[in-house]
Amino acid sequence: MTATPGEGTLVGRARVADRAHPLVVTVRDGEVYDITSRDAPTVRDICEMTDPVGYVASCAGRSLGPVAEIETNSHQAARDKARPHLLSPVDLQAVKASGVTFVVSLLERVIEEQARGDADKADAIRADIAHHIGHDLSKLKPGSPEAMAIKQRLIERGAWSQYLEVGIGPDAEIFTKCQPLASVGFGADVGLHPVSTWNNPEPEVAVIASSEGRIVGATLGNDVNLRDVEGRSALLLGKAKDNNASAALGPFIRLFDDTFSLDDVKQAEVRLHVRGEDGFELEGSSSMSEISRAPEELVAAAMGRHHQYPDGMALYLGTMFVPSKDRGEAGRGFTHHAGDSVEISSPKLGTLINRVQLSTECTPWTYGASRFMRDLASAGLI
């Protein structure tokens, strides 16, 4: 059993000892193939093609070995650098993220803020809000007249939150998760800023869009979040979200073809399983069918005539799952411990596995675009 989907057109990246540059790879019959070429020396180049699926299916390649073996060697704690290991499946694309995209979880956050940890009070507030705005908000369209009326009612009853504007207002929250080439892949350590004492994983689907805004595929992502830092001020979002190794993607991009489409993304179930070295376990799930803003709407909010991305983008779509299970003292909720194993899975996208460390203890990010271009040029690929 591997973490990689058993079907579909997959594209990703890998490192091998005898090449200075990362390789563009795909999976064929259970083996990982190097398909790097002058036609497509980067994953970005494949995603910009008119027919990326056709290219990946037909191009020549050399086997790097069974996908199961390469997955095993990708775990950073026991990695043999002489053997192939996986990287994040994106390279030159911008890495962006969207927040507060699930209205149901947004309102629960407002309720939690109002209740301040009192479960009985939370139930009363929930009943009061339901009386004013109804129980089922899953079909609420952000920015619609109905949404604006609900927002006004919440403000009038003192339930205003800084998240309301982006949750049900006309404008989506879009922010930079990390710089191109800074995301980490399957098996890598993910990083927490050492100032944080309250943090969590965010299990998400990330879509891959070309420079024209065409969504060509999807992968899994962990939008690692520092809840205490973001909670202090929305203006600290960059510090809460963008740290060394805080953006994980993988294991592969699954390109849209006859077996997988944007409709599959919209119906995906994303599961989370955290295992701690202290024996603690946490499980949860997020249903993409409950997202309030469609993936194509989020991509359009991020890029278009108002903002261009000539190398395309990877865009995290958000999560409805906020872990609250106590870890230790009652009422203190969940936070990561160093050494936690985080598994994010969805049947058609596979499983993304990462180990949690402080960002200061993760491998420093030193391989940027200038070095990447020089390595490709030295190899005669550009």
Image (spheres, grey):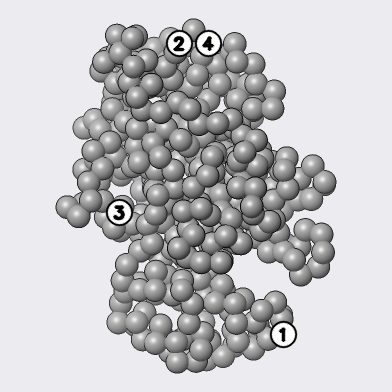
User: At which x and y percent is residue 8?
Assistant: 43, 32
Question: Rounded to the nearest whole Å, what is the CA distance between mark 4 and mark 3?
Answer: 37 Å
Which residue is label 1 attached to?
A: 120
Q: Secondary structure at mark 3?
A: helix
Which residue is label 2 attached to?
A: 19
Task: Report the residue at 70% width, 77% height from top.
Answer: 117
The earlier-in-sequence mark between 4 and 3 is 4
Task: Report the residue at 65% width, 35% height from top.
Answer: 361
The earlier-in-sequence mark between 2 and 3 is 2
Q: Amino acid at mark 3?
A: Ala
User: At which x and y percent is residue 312?
Assistant: 29, 39
Foreground disc of the pair 1, 2:
2
The earlier-in-sequence mark between 1 and 3 is 1
Q: How many numbered discs sit on the rendered protein? A: 4
Q: Secondary structure at mark 4?
A: loop
Which residue is label 4 attached to?
A: 17
